[in-house]
């Protein structure tokens, strides 16, 4: 289908759609470029594992991290790929891998990052979302080291350069604000809908992004940190159970009871005459629509109508 004059009735809505598409194209091209670099690095790493460490793809499923560290230490003795030290330890390898993350851990623990803002009627709230973390990575951490990847870049010492980076990042965030709000809304809606269908844990408790960085130790590798935080979920839930919100529980059970009563009535009417569910309309909506809404309300109310919170989730920490 071809439109002769597609921009004849070009309004604000069409401009927003076109602008969002352009932002998406730039985002897609950037990710393709980053993915190409990532694939190249993974190919080099695979060659290192196979040729030097004698570890093949199938062996990765049975080897522990300590085994890989031992082989890296042995490779240092043979090939001396690190010219600073004769022998490498597990701490040396971990500090090399975590060199960027250690700076963010230090900034969070020392209070350099001001993560609290004052909101009207809500008071002071801490804001350290994934978007904030991404901006810090792009502005600071990704350009932290120079071309040799061992020494700090000279621009990192320049206050003027850092200020220019923050201003540029602020302008970019302002330009992509509206498309990102729409994208994040749709993304989190579909993501949490899928998790709700799979785990039925819409009301689950989880650590905030700020506390994940606050609890993280220096040189703590991602897989070790993720396991430690998973182990912390059970005692954290036991602590939460010590302070049940009975008002929330009572209100949720009340809503579930009222919605369930109406849903049962509609189901009985549908059994009596199935045409009622399709053709009987209330405020221009048939009974099937009300049955679906009531079912969703009952599902959400039952999640919040229990004193025990759902199992906590710890996502992959990258």
Image (cartoon, grey):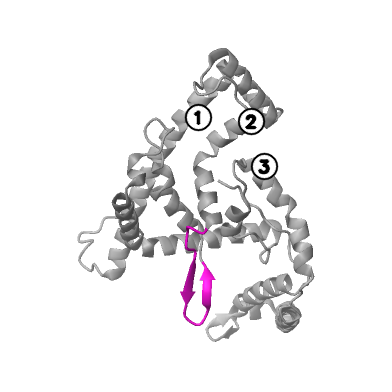
Residue beneath the point at 74% across and 83% down: 254
Q: Nearer the viewer, mark 2 or mark 3?
A: 2
Q: Is residue 35 above or below residue 232?
A: above
Foreground residue among 10 and 104: 104
Where residue 71 sits: x, y (%)? Answer: 64, 21
Q: Secondary structure at mark 3?
A: helix
Taking 50 as reference, is 255 left or right? right
Where residue 116 sits: x, y (%)? Answer: 50, 68
Q: Is residue 281 magenta?
A: no
Q: Is residue 235 visible in this depiction of the protein?
A: yes
Q: Is residue 124 magenta?
A: yes
Taking 132 as reference, is 57 left or right? right
Q: Residue 42 bears which disc, if any?
A: 1
Q: Is residue 126 above or below residue 43?
A: below
Mark 3 lies on residue = 224
**Spatial distance from mark 3 to mark 1, Cα to Cα?**
22 Å
Q: Residue 209 bears which disc, if any?
A: none
Foreground residue among 159 and 250: 159
Residue beneath the point at 53% across and 17% down: 80
**Spatial distance from mark 2 to mark 3, Cα to Cα?**
13 Å
Taking 250 as reference, is 111 left or right? left
Task: Check contact, mark 2 vs mark 3: CB within 8 A.
Answer: no
Task: Check contact, mark 2 vs mark 1: CB within 8 A.
Answer: no
Foreground residue among 25 and 318: 318
Q: Which residues are magenta?
A: 111-126
Q: Secondary structure at mark 1?
A: helix
Taking 242 as reference, is 128 left or right? left
Q: Residue 90 bears which disc, if any?
A: 2
Where residue 102 sits: x, y (%)? Answer: 53, 44
**Spatial distance from mark 2 to mark 1, Cα to Cα?**
22 Å
């Amino acid at each position: 289908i071809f439109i002769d004059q597609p921009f004849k009735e070009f309004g604000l809505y069409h401009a927003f759609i076109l602008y969002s598409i352009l932002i998406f194209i730039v985002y897609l091209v950037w990710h393709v470029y980053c993915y190409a670099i990532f694939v190249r690095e993974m190919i080099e790493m695979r060659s290192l594992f196979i040729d030097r460490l004698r570890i093949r793809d199938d062996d990765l499923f049975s080897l522990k991290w300590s085994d890989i560290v031992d082989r890296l230490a042995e490779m240092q003795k043979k090939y001396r790929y690190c010219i600073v030290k004769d022998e490498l330890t597990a701490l040396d390898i971990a500090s090399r891998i975590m060199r960027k993350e250690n700076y963010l851990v230090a900034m969070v623990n020392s209070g350099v990052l001001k993560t609290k803002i004052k909101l009207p009627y809500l008071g002071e709230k801490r804001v350290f979302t994934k978007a904030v973390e991404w901006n810090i990575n792009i502005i600071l951490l990704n350009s932290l080291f120079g071309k040799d990847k061992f020494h700090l870049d000279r621009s990192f010492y320049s206050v003027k350069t850092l200020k220019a980076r923050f201003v540029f990042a602020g302008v970019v965030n302002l330009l992509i604000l509206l498309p990102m709000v729409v994208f994040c809304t749709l993304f989190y809606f579909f993501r949490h809908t899928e998790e709700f269908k799979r785990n039925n844990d819409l009301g689950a408790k989880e650590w905030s992004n700020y506390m994940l960085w606050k609890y993280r130790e220096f040189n703590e590798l991602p897989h070790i940190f993720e396991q430690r935080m998973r182990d912390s979920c059970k005692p954290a839930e036991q602590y939460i159970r010590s302070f049940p919100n009975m008002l929330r529980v009572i209100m949720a059970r009340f809503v579930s009871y009222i919605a369930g009563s109406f849903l049962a009535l509609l189901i009985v009417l549908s059994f009596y005459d199935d045409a009622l569910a399709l053709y009987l309309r209330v405020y221009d909506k048939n009974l099937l629509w009300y049955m679906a809404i009531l079912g969703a309300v009952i599902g959400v109310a039952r999640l919040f109508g229990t004193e025990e919170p759902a199992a906590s989730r710890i996502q992959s920490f990258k």
